[in-house]
Image (tube, rainbow, N blue to C red):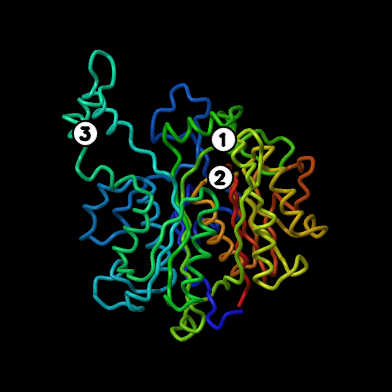
Amino acid sequence: MPDRRAVLTGLGVVSPLGIGVDDTFQALLDGASGLRTFDLFDPGNFPVTFAGQIQDFSARRFVPKSYRKAVKVMARDIEIVVAAADQAFRNADLETRGTSDGEEMTVPAKRIGCNIGAGLICTELNELGVAINTAVKDGKFDYKLWGETGINNLTPLWLLKYLPNMLSCHVTIIHNARGPSNCITCGDASGHLATAEAAMYIMRNTADVAISGGAESKINPMGLLRQGLLGRLCTTRNDRPTEAIRPFDADADGTTVGEGGGLVIVEELEHARQRGARIYAEVAGFGAACDPAGIEIEKATAGNLGLAVRNAMTMAGVTADDVDAIFTQGTGVPGEDLAEAVAWKSALGERTASIPAYSYTAAMGTLYAGTAGMQLALAGKAIEAGKLPPTRNHTQPAEGCELSVAAEARNLDLNCVVCAAFTVGGQSGAVVLKKV
């Protein structure tokens, strides 16, 4: 164990169930669903018309007045992460220039780090399409015409809306975080990998505080189209969206897209104690892995998740007997759920079937780069509350899915929780949280 220990002192959530970790966690405990027919664009003839959409949302409410003009050059992914960051810093009771009108800061700017997971942000087709249409000649796209006039029909700051690193960029500017900063684009596992790196900032004494996690919105035509082509979407329950996604269930037949983000404040333990911070849990261990089979898109893989979990547990110095709960992905895609369940069993052995397991996907949809960050924020809250929410729509375990998933909330003494996520592309990440 390093001399400097990393703990979670702030949780920030923006989800289809609400803004803030308390509201979202309570909604999950109540068995609520954030899946509904979406209206961010006209679904037209898409085979899926429902998603986990955040309602009545704009980042303008979560940035200083002096920064509101910048919201115009934020893609929806960026707006989500900016709001989640505001929630995380407030939840940690850390004053930054983004959460206070004054100049005083709880932590020196150069000791605040940032590492945020992001997706490959989809451009807004109405912006790009109009410009492209001005470069069409005789019914065909003309590269010369595009270079001469077409590209000039895009705003000069257009690209800054869609670079993945802009999530970290806006958060560090707003909160005057001048310590180490990075952006990780590894799909659903991004938040775990980002938090692992943020914890290393703390352990290596390059920062005293860091914000990490991830956010993404896939509710756009390209996002929905790609997931449909991969055969991952549930196309049979458009009339029953709240019943559609069924993690590890015998009646599962696909997932849907969602949007959201989870960010956590990672802080050095003694630093947190000295300022009287609330400590949710310690980042006790973390691991990463990959699976070359991930490049075979038609073959379900959990990204060697079992290895990532084992590595995280080894670093944390825990065994399967120490684990009180696991936060799973549970996409509701049958092959993926089976691959994930097998991976968990490879890491936890015969205890797997008796360790309480949880997935929030049925209530929010798949959050992609927001997946792991949401897991960590909810796990931190679950440790504090001593409660594990119900996994919606789970009635009968699918064959081979030997996980202790429950459709009702459970009161538990959570001292050690393992969170893990994987990507269709074959990467995985895991984090062990322990009560301090």
Q: Position of residue 423 (x, y in %)?
A: 57, 46
Question: Of all residues shown, which one is farthest toward the bottom?
Answer: 274
For residue 151, the mark is 3
Q: Residue at x 49, y 30 (%)?
A: 49
For residue 241, the mark is 1
Q: Residue at x 66, y 63 (%)?
A: 311
**Label tally:** 3
Q: Residue at x 70, y 66 (%)?
A: 412
Mark 1 touches mark 2? (CB < 8 Å) = yes
Q: Residue at x 60, y 67 (%)?
A: 385
The image quadrant of residue 84 is: bottom left
Compared across the picture, whether 327 is left or right of 106 comes to right
Res. 244 in view: no
Residue under pointer 2: 33
From the viewer's side, name the closer residue of 359 and 156. Answer: 156
Q: Position of residue 141 (x, y in %)?
A: 28, 21
